Image: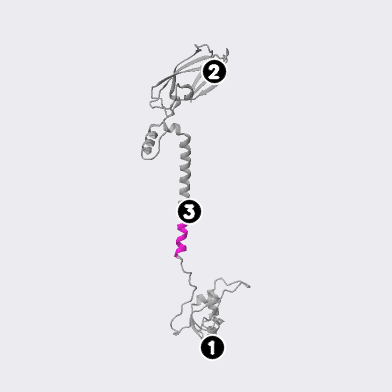
Amino acid sequence: MQIRCPGCQASYRIDIAALAAAHGQARCCSCETLFDATRPAADAAAAAGGEASVDVRRLLRRLQRNPPPPGAPVSPPLPLSLPLDDPGVPSPLQFASPPALDLDQTLAAPRRQRLRRLGQGLAVMALLALAAAQWAWIERDRLLTDPVVRAALTQLCANLPCALAPQRDPAGYLVLQRQLEPAADATGGLALRVSFVNQRDFAQPPPQLQLSLFDTGQSLLARRTLTPREYLPGPVDPGRLVAAEEVITIELRLADPGPHATGFELAFY
């Protein structure tokens, strides 16, 4: 359909369906005149007086399948393109250009998501490593007695400035002989002679020796824990180890606990 601006007489070719969507209103892009684009065509058809003329208003009403109810806001006028130099060439409608694509902003969101996921993964790994290190520290004595763990740590320390603590398992000591009797000298008191052996197949530090005295009802009368320096004879080397199957014999002097003490117990720690 061809229309003409009543203000500047600029000629346009426009799709009648698009004109129907704008309710017949159009705005000239040359002089900004707002006009009813259906009136000139209807007036021209009436002036021709022919029965074959087209009633533009009726055609627009047919194209508008859902006419707006009374009082509804009217759609904005249809913007027109530049005037046609050649009326025979249809003029395309003008549409607002989309905003330019910002490549940096487009790539920034996925990059931030990847960095956030990487940070979360590293945080989870750090927490797991911390929990494993804490568990290993709590169970260090048991882990150091495991042959596989011990071999791996020994190989690791061979290449690093570190040294493994000697294996330690106090439950590996066994009492072979014990005897409690009055002391032979005139000082009085009791003499405790104990022999114990390291049953493990590895050397380990001397244990702490706990001595407990009981009465006839098995009630605890006294308890004392002795370090290796207190029960081993002579000066004790801090790095001394008890070899596998080595037997140690010691003698302890005890004050007389009285007639109520009838039994004793030894434990290693």
Quote the CA–CA distance across marks 2 and 3. 64 Å
- 171 over 188 or under it: above or below: below
Of all residues, the one furthest to the right in this rendering is 71
Give above or below for 96 relative to 46: above
Q: Main secondary structure of the magenta part?
A: helix
On screen, residue 229 versus residue 155, left or right, reads right
The structure's colour scheme is one colour
Which amino acid, by three-letter code, is at mark 1? Ala
Q: Residue 201: image x %, image y %?
A: 38, 26
The numbered dot on residue 47 is 1
In the image, is residue 114 part of the stretch drawn in magenta? yes
- Image spot of residue 46 (x, y percent): 54, 86
Q: Which residue is mark 3?
A: 116
Residue kind at label 2, given as amino acid type: Leu
Label 2, secondary structure: give it.
Answer: strand
Tell me if 188 is positioned left or right of 146 in this view. Answer: right
Local SS, label 1 = helix
Circle 3: element type: helix
Q: Which residue is denoted by mark 2 in the rendering?
A: 213
Say whether disc 2 or disc 3 marks the residue closer to the N-terminus: 3
Magenta span contains residue 165: no
